[in-house]
Image (tube, grey):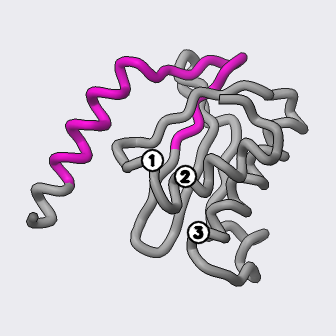
Amino acid sequence: MSQIDKASRRQKIKDRSRGNVQGTSAKPRLCVYRSLSQIYAQLIDDVNGKTILAASTLSKDNSALKGSKSELCRIIGNQLGQKALAQGITCVVFDRNGFRYHGRVKALADGAREAGLIF
């Protein structure tokens, strides 16, 4: 499967699932983006079009972290969950953004659940 086919496949899945997933200020959308070597997660309020929180492996807090990609994803999810709980957010809607719920995406979700987020 070529790169164009993979990208168009993921875009179709993303568009199809976006109709069911929408975040509000009370229950924001936890959006995950996975690149080859990094992972990014955001809590988004779609009603107001604002990003509430963000965490990634590239942030300054996480530059010294060591471990496998899956372990880092679990740590990022845990950090995002703790930041969300500090702001009073307990429930979120998970948006896997067209990626399979497996591996690093699942590890990030598990880390967020360990921190106390409900989805």
Mark 2 and mark 1 lie on one chain; the one further toward the N terminus is 1
Mark 1 and mark 3 lie on one chain; the one further toward the N terminus is 3
The quarter of the picture where residue 84 lies is: top right
Identify which amino acid the numbered label 1 is placed on.
Tyr
Which residue was labeled with disc 2? 106
x, y (%) of residue 55?
67, 55
Relative to 62, say whether 92 is above or below.
above
Relative to 90, say whether 42 is above or below.
below
Q: Specify start and end residues of the magenta stretch as a single range.
A: 7-31
Mark 2 and mark 3 lie on one chain; the one further toward the N terminus is 3
Relative to 116, say whether 78 is above or below.
below
Q: Is residue 18 found left or right of 96 in the rendered image?
A: left
For the N terminus, the image quarter is: bottom left
Tag count: 3
What is the secondary structure assignment of the residue under circle 3? helix
Gap in angstroms between the C-alphas marked 2 and 1: 5 Å
Give the numbered dot on residue 70.
Answer: 3
Identify which amino acid the numbered label 3 is placed on.
Ser
Q: Is residue 16 magenta?
A: yes
Front-most of 12 and 42?
12
The quarter of the picture where residue 30 lies is: top right
x, y (%) of residue 32?
51, 48
For the C terminus, the image quarter is: top right
Q: Is residue 85 found left or right of 92 in the rendered image?
A: right
Residue beneath the point at 55% across and 34% down: 94
Front-most of 70 and 34?
70
Q: Is residue 41 magenta?
A: no
Residue beneath the point at 61% across and 79% down: 68
Q: Residues within 10 Å of mark 1 (few under 14, many from 20)?
A: some
What is the secondary structure assignment of the residue under circle 1? loop
Which residue was labeled with disc 1? 101
Identify which amino acid the numbered label 2 is placed on.
Lys
